[in-house]
Amino acid sequence: MSELKVMSDLRIDKERRAATLTLSDGRQITGSFFVAGSSISHAGPERVKDILNSQNAFFPFEVNDGVGAHTGIFNREQIIVVSLATDEAHGEAAYDVATRRSVEMLLSNGTRLTGMVRVYCRRGSDRLSDYTRAEEMFRYLETPDALLLVNFRYVLQLSEVEAA
């Protein structure tokens, strides 16, 4: 009985965050990430971006394949884009004051994405080239249809464009 109590004391409750993964082989997988109610790297709840930018090579993802749900373990380096069902970007520190840049991204799979990125650098160092120097592998792209997390290892070209 005490063994069960120890296990439950170590359990971390997680919430599901709906998303669609685009894999390097072209498949799209719909399901949910598991995020914690608090983050070890910043104030507030854990974000999908935190999971994808962690040091762990693999992450759990609940796959909804129409037949049922099951959890798969995915290699984050093989994820090209994640389309999020909720807008977690607003929770970033300095989100409202970051410099906005309208961009087009050409990905290695031939996809062109357009949207807005936020450059979290001080004035004068907030150019698009400064944005590309960030250490995070997965970065937000805000589009009219969705909030995306783009794996920058798959970005071939990044161009600033006029806002639509």
Image (cartoon, rainbow, N blue to C red):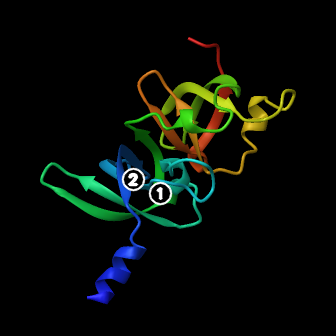
Q: Provide residue 77's location: percent of width, then percent of height.
A: 52, 59
Q: Which residue is the site of mark 2?
A: 25
Q: Residue 41's quadrant in the figure? A: bottom right
40 left or right of 13 in image: right
On-image quarter of the N terminus: bottom left
Q: Provide residue 29's location: percent of width, then percent of height.
A: 31, 49
Could you tell me which residue is drawn at 87 percent across and 27 percent down?
124
Q: Provide residue 51's location: percent of width, then percent of height.
A: 51, 56
Q: How far separated are the C-alphas under marks 2 and 1? A: 8 Å
Q: Is residue 157 above or below residue 133?
A: above
Could you tell me which residue is drawn at 74 percent across and 30 percent down?
128
Give the total of numbered labels. 2
Question: Mark 2 packing: few (<14 Cα in 10 Å), some, or many (20+)?
Answer: few
Which of the pair 124/129 is nearer the observer? 124
Which of the pair 33/30 is nearer the observer? 33
Amino acid bearing label 1: Gln
Residue situated furthest right in the rendering: 124
Q: Provide residue 57's location: percent of width, then percent of height.
A: 52, 67
Q: Which residue is the site of mark 1?
A: 78
Q: Which mark is residue 54?
A: none
Q: Is residue 55 above or below residue 87?
A: below
- What secondary structure is found at the residue carrying circle 2? loop
Amino acid bearing label 2: Asp
- What secondary structure is found at the residue carrying circle 1? helix
Q: First in sequence: mark 2 or mark 1?
A: 2
Q: Are marks 2 and 1 in contact (CB under 8 Å)?
A: yes
Could you tell me which residue is drawn at 32 percent across and 64 percent down?
72
Which of the pair 27/127 is nearer the observer? 127
